[in-house]
Structure formats: C-alpha cells, structure tokens
C-alpha cells in the first residue's frame, strides 16, 4: 500500500541520516583533532550531498 511504501521510504531516510551523522561526526572530529584543512571541506560536501539526495 502507499502507506507501507511511505513508511519504508521514511525508515530508509532515517537509517541513512544516522549513517551520515556518523560520517559527518567522524570527519568533523578528524578535522578538529588533526587540523586537516580539507576536513571541513569534506564535511561540507557531505552535507550538500545529503541535502541533494534526500
């Protein structure tokens, strides 16, 4: 049914969000810990990527 499909989509997005948060958190931490200048860029592009596909 349409409701089941919507629930499945929503669940997929929630799971994806959790994974993205982990990645963003990891990269942000790495950037903070090692002063990698590209770390911030990577975190930014991940955020943009996330917005584009959701």
Image (cartoon, helix red, strand yellow):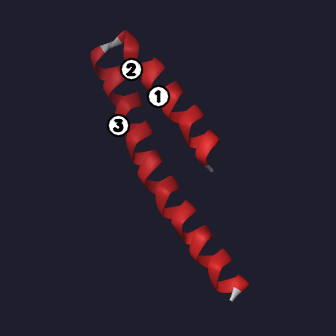
- Seen at 63% across and 41% down, the residue is 51
The numbered mark, 3 or 1, whose residue comes first in the sequence reads 3
Q: Is residue 30 above or below residue 34?
A: below
Please report contact status of discs 2 and 3: CB closer than 8 Å, yes or no: no
Q: Position of residue 46 (x, y in %)?
A: 49, 33
Residue furthest left in the image: 34
Check disc 3 and report the residue beneath it: 26
Q: Whole-Å distance between the Cαs marked 3 and 1?
A: 9 Å
Side of 43 where 51 appears, left or right: right
Please report contact status of discs 1 and 2: CB closer than 8 Å, yes or no: yes
Q: Secondary structure at mark 1?
A: helix
Q: Is residue 33 above or below residue 4?
A: above
Along the viewing direction, whichever of 16 and 40 lies nearer the viewer: 16
- Seen at 37% across and 31% down, the residue is 27
Q: Is residue 18 above or below residue 4?
A: above
Check disc 1 and report the residue beneath it: 43
Disc number placed over residue 39 in the picture, else none: 2
The numbered mark, 2 or 3, whose residue comes first in the sequence reads 3
Q: Whole-Å distance between the Cαs marked 1 and 2?
A: 6 Å
Q: Quadrant of the N terminus?
A: bottom right
Q: Secondary structure at mark 3?
A: helix
Residue furthest right in the image: 2
3 vs 1, front mark? 1
Along the viewing direction, whichever of 10 and 37 lies nearer the viewer: 10
């Amino acid at each position: 049914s349409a409701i089941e499909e919507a629930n499945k989509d929503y669940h997929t997005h929630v799971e994806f969000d959790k994974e993205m948060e982990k990645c963003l958190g990891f990269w942000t931490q790495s950037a903070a810990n090692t002063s990698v200048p590209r770390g911030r860029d990577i975190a930014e592009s991940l955020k943009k990527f996330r917005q584009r596909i959701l």
